[in-house]
Image: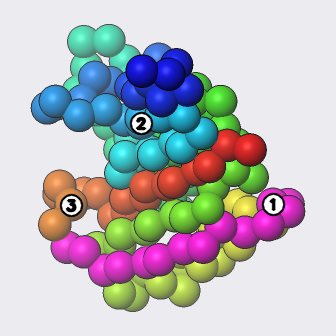
Amino acid sequence: MSDKLHKTAITPSTHTAPPAKFSHGVRKGNILQVAGQVGFLPATPGHSPTPAGPTLREQTVQTLANVKAILEEGGASWEDVVMLRVYLTDVEHFAELNEIYNEYFADLKEAPSARTTVYVGLPAGLLIEIDALAVLG
């Protein structure tokens, strides 16, 4: 098999090991898929994951930082992202999410496509999950 097609699992040092047999991110060739990330603070050895805070803003900013850490570990940046999928637990958070999203990506040359879904199945206290698909040029 060609080295370009080798599949590589990605777990940055800021992330805890996944609780099951999956990876935070996977790169194969020029494709990088970031698994759903939530607003947990960077990992502290010996401690359970801790949400960045109770607010949508705190969790969204941390979630984006967690996605970015995986992108960078896999050799990508936000400019390489072609699709973001956002999952919210409350439809009332759409307007605030759009405000945070626009602030965060204000300097991005080309915005990725995005899809937002209201999904109530996140663990208690978590308000948002984001996954990303990047194609490296």
Of residues 83 and 54, the one drawn nearer to the viewer in this rendering: 83
Read off the residue under disc 3: 122
Read off the residue under disc 1: 108
Q: Residue at x 38, y 40 (%)?
A: 40
Asked which secondary structure carries label 3, the reply is loop
Q: Is residue 102 visible?
A: yes
* On screen, residue 44 above or below 26: above
Mark 1 → mark 2, Cα distance in angstroms: 22 Å
Q: Residue at x 54, y 34 (%)?
A: 29
Mark 3 → mark 2, Cα distance in angstroms: 19 Å
Q: Is residue 39 visible?
A: no
Q: Residue 27: horizontal and vertical position, in percent?
A: 48, 34
Task: State which quadrant residue 55 falls in.
Answer: bottom left
First of labels 1, 3 by sequence position: 1
Specify start and end residues of the magenta stretch as a single range: 107-120
Asked which secondary structure carries label 1, the reply is loop
Q: Residue 72: horizontal and vertical position, in percent?
A: 63, 32
Read off the residue under disc 2: 25
Q: Residue 74: horizontal and vertical position, in percent?
A: 57, 30
Quadrant showing the N terminus: top left
Amino acid, disc 3: Leu
Q: Residue at x 43, y 68 (%)?
A: 86
* On screen, residue 27 above or below 80: above
Amino acid, disc 2: Gly
Amino acid, disc 1: Leu
